[in-house]
Amino acid sequence: MTESNEFPKSDLIRAGEVPLESILCTEELHRRPSRPPDYQKENRALLALSNALADSPRTVLQTLADTILEVCQSGSAGISLLSSDDGGKRFCWPAIAGMWKPHIGGGTPRNFGPCGDVLDRNTPLLFGNIARRYTYFQPVTPAVEEALLIPFYVEGKAVGTIWAVAHDPRRKFDAEDERVMLSLGRFASSAYQILASLDALNVEMAQREKAEASLRLSNAKLESLIEKRTGALRRLTISLLQSQDEERRRFGRNLHDSIGQYLTIIKMNLDVMNGLGENDLTRPELLSQCLNAVEACLKETRTISYLLHPPLLDEAGFESAARWYVDGFAQRGRIQATLNFPEKMERLPRSVELALFRILQESLTNVHRHSGSPTVEIGIEVDAEIVSLVVRDVGRGIPQHVMEQFRESGTAGIGLAGMRERLADLGGELRVQSDKKGTLLQATIPLHGGTLRQPRSEFVA
């Protein structure tokens, strides 16, 4: 699509008569049956992005578009970035894959388009038949049946979107597409941040091209920056893959040790019943054992499902989901847990609630596995500008070498690195105080899409 600087006012008025809510179908993402995750494909995608960043940084956005196209099986995919030459009045499309690839370089206006709506709401959105509202899409071929757009953040600031488009009416996006795009978007955010650093250094090399010594110094800085950040990204990628493998092993063990045993009991009883005569097929003790095993299977399945993503988080919000999870954690881990929540806590933005819940999960997992603490205290504070989650234990503390590694590279431990990345995507900060008397972790997130005045992620001894 060719970008024009001004859209006819009459077109905007006619398009504006179609309300935004009439083309939004975001809730369908979690109503539709979701395809199972393909972690092998996702891991290959992350490695492809990491290799592109290391070998040819300028191609990383196109690699991201190609990756989204393949993983989400969409008709087209791409990246939209706010323009810098006119104060961000429009979105440009620097990378596109699939059927819309000839439209690279096109874009949409910031104040009236799907990308602008995503940034205004600061959340993923699923659109259907966008040309009904945004009439400038009507001549674009092939037409849009559905479009899934995710905010794209750099250093906590939304600078554009990543998107996938279905041209075939039979292709419907689901929650797995949203999860994968969010995962790839977080990784690409770090990559794009490196590109911005490279651009800044290139400018500096051009403010100094007449001074040979300064040019050599700039080259040395550039090579050092690329090597440091590429190494950190690769280490983080490897840690992510190892963490995923460990999570799958844990999940597999849980299935084998719980549901697998109950199913074995059912099968053994059914084998016995199969060998009985017609008058003995209704032996009550065998049927009772089978029913009890089935009931246990259902209970275990619900528990595993809730731990992966509790419905309470979507239905009632972070407070209810946190209380449910902490109660279960205290029972399973035999750790006394204390909750300090506001007397009346309102719902938070969906992305903030999800981030807080995952950070709470990871923090309590660390307390259970590593701290040896008999107690843990969880508190949350909310005001008009920020929300803050605090987790405090009285365990053995974080090892000194882990703290030093975090200060140097910011990648100490996959759990802490994951928390840091989640918070960075939302403009938040991670602060950890730790000594031999225990550990205090504080995660702070700005509300309403803002940023903290002095964002930081650090350890304090």
Image (cartoon, rainbow, N blue to C red):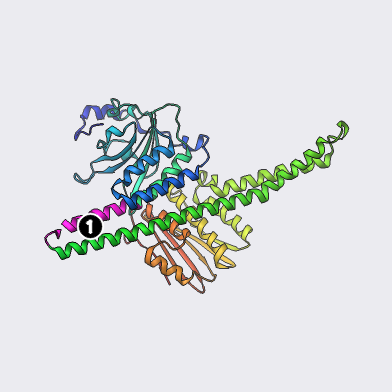
- Say left or right for 42 vs 310: left
**Which residue occupies 67% across, 46% down?**
259
Q: Give the residues drawn in magenta, as a range.
A: 190-210
Query: What is the number of callouts on the image?
Result: 1
Residue at which label 1 appears: 201
Task: Identify the element where label 1 is drawn.
Answer: helix
Tell whether position 203 is magenta.
yes
Q: Nearer the viewer, residue 412 or 428?
A: 412
At x 38%, y 52%, the residue is 425
Camera-side residue of 315 and 364: 364
The 10 Å Cα crowd at callout 1, few under 14, some 14 to 19, many 20 or more, is: some
List x then y, in percent, for residue 453: 31, 60
Q: Position of residue 278 (x, y in %)?
A: 86, 31
In the rendered view, would you say 450 is above or below 413? Answer: above
Q: Which amino acid type is shown beneath numbered disc 1?
A: Leu
Say which residue appears at 24% left-offset and 27% top-offset: 11
